[in-house]
Image (tube, rainbow, N blue to C red):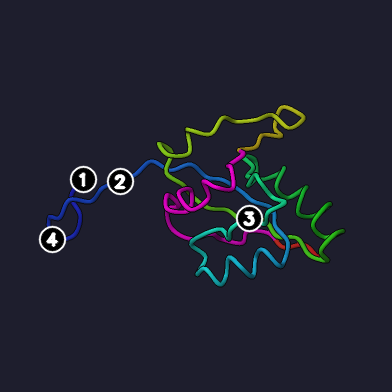
Amino acid sequence: MEGVAGRRVRVRATTTLWRPTGPVELDLVRELDWRAWPPRLPEQPIFYLVLDEDYAIKIARDWNVKHDGAGFVTRFEIETAFVSRYPVRQAGGRTILELWVPAEELDDFNAHIVGVIQVVHEFR
């Protein structure tokens, strides 16, 4: 694909993911300039992401608000070729789909985020 001044532009296929989160994690994402997820705590061996916006809303609204006083739904793009290494897991109903990223792989995961992490819903 030709870009500005005839330069070649590499277009990467991306996948949209959502993450429901509380205010503490969101502050850490802000500190990382909205480009990465913070390291997991020792008691958090898996980084969970969801493939359905409605499911992310339900978690942020019904769980994060109750436990943290606020819930946020974030959305971001990640390289499809990279994220395809993680199997989709069904956590309940047909649309309750998650990706589980081992905590020790989070730096590599972050390196494949395309663009920035965005807050798309907020609940209090």
Q: CA distance from mark 4 to mark 3?
A: 43 Å
Which mark is drawn over residue 40? 3
- Between the C-alphas of marks 1 and 4, the distance is 12 Å
The amino acid type found where label 4 is placed reads Ala
- Residue at 48 percent across and 53 percent down: it is 107
Identify whether 39 is placed above or below 44: below
Image: magenta residue range = 100-121
> Which residue, given by chain and number where applicable, does mark 2 sit on?
11
Distance between mark 2 and mark 4 Cα atoms: 17 Å
State which quarter of the image contains the N terminus: top left
Q: Which mark is residue 5?
A: 4
Q: Quadrant of the C terminus?
A: bottom right
Nearer the camera: disc 3 or disc 2: 3
Query: Dot 1 lies on which element?
Result: loop
The residue to which callout 1 is attached is 1
Amino acid residing under circle 2: Val
In the image, residue 43 lies at what x, y percent? 72, 51
Residue at the image position 84 percent from the left and 52 percent from the top:
62
